Amino acid sequence: MKISSKPVLAFALSMTVAVTARAQKAETVSIRQTEKSKIEIVIGGKPFTSFLYPDTLEKPVLYPIRSANGTLVTRGFPLTTRPGDPTDHPHHIGLWFNFENLNGLDFWNNSYAIPANKKSGYGWIRTDRITKIQSGKKGILAYHANWTNQQKQVILEESTRFEFSGTAADRIIDRITTLTADTDAFFKDAKDGMLGLRLAHDLQIPDTADQKFTDDKGNVTVVKGGADKVANGTYLTSAGKMGNDAWSTRSVWCKVYGKMGTDSVSITIIDHPQNPNYPTFWHARGYGLFAANPLGEKVFTNGKSEKNLRLKKGESVTFRYRIVVHSGKGTSSTEALNNEAAIFGKTK
């Protein structure tokens, strides 16, 4: 089912919310800086996630991310590897936002694994200041960062605002990111982008065969398959696509869900009606990459169409996403997620 962005329908759906976080008691959000480049977010007295932005990372990330029950829903590798963690794609860390081809530079695939003599082809996102920290029923964390080349020349300025909220069963992240061009900026249609989340092993779709993935520079990454007694996740989109069939399709939201020990967990990413190329394409891989990419149309449509984005110096573009982590018996229902998407589209 696709959600209309029309205010009347959004209002009608918002009146029928049954199983959403808004029907439950909100828990207090506490945000505090604990280290020079680390800010911790605590909801209901329990650790939720941390905002990490040291210069040793190639972009700022939320890592790790936990469910309301404390279950780690993101992969540990490469920062804190846990037993059984897949070790492919070292640039997949927690939750992040970047893109594969901006003015010819690859921001997405940059990591410690790139040899020094090839770093010139990769971009860097450097957080230079925190602009707001606010605790309360809704926690707010805002920052400013620069998208640069290896010489630290600025291509884009990023202003991002996170809004965190939660209940006994849910954790919600609203991310609003505005990119402003310091020089003419060209996002060339590419597969790897933009909002990315690397899932814990349990939420992968089990696969017995090895998989090979090649980036635009010809680098090959192998994801090992085999007998897997841990992975049990799958995807579902608002358009009804399931499992690996979710990849390359577009819809208002996409959800991954599965069992994690004694916990049942779902994570849903919701697109916003005002985002470029709405509804987004889903770069949702069974091996654990869960990403929303509105600018990968050429790859996802087998060349039938493409979506490039150009910003002249001084122009801006804004991306808005909601991430809902649900835990408990069963996972957030399709009806509840449709309602949540409608509310998100109306209020943000």
Image: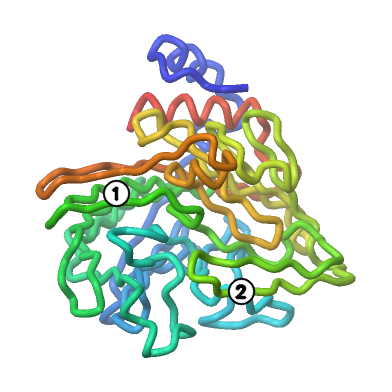
Residue 97 x %, y %: 39, 58
The answer to whether 240 appears left or right of 215 in the picture is: right
State the SS at label 1: strand
The relative height of residue 13 versus residue 83 in the rendered view (above or below) is: above
The answer to whether 42 appears left or right of 133 in the picture is: right
Q: Do the residues bearing badges 1 and 2 touch, measured as CB atoms within 8 Å?
A: no
For residue 235, which numbered disc appears in the image?
none
The answer to whether 235 appears left or right of 214 in the picture is: right
Determine crowd level at label 1: few under 14, some 14-19, many 20+ residues with C-alpha closer than 10 A: many
Residue 128 in which image quadrant: bottom left
Residue 344 x %, y %: 42, 31
Name the residue: 57% across, 22% down: 2
Determine crowd level at label 2: few under 14, some 14-19, many 20+ residues with C-alpha closer than 10 A: few
Q: Quadrant of the C terminus?
A: top left
Residue 200 x %, y %: 65, 66
Name the residue: 45% across, 39% down: 306
Q: Please tell me whether mark 1 or mark 2 is closer to you in this view.
A: 2
Q: Amino acid at mark 2?
A: Val
Q: Quadrant of the N terminus?
A: top right
Name the residue: 40% across, 28% down: 273
Q: Which residue is mark 2?
A: 220
Q: Amino acid at mark 1?
A: Thr
The answer to whether 283 appears left or right of 134 in the picture is: right
State the SS at label 2: strand
Q: Nearer the viewer, residue 81 or 249?
A: 249
Q: Which residue is mark 1?
A: 177
* Earlier sequence position, callout 1 versus callout 2: 1
What is the CA distance from the residue labelled 1 to the residue labelled 2?
A: 31 Å
Name the residue: 54% across, 81% down: 78
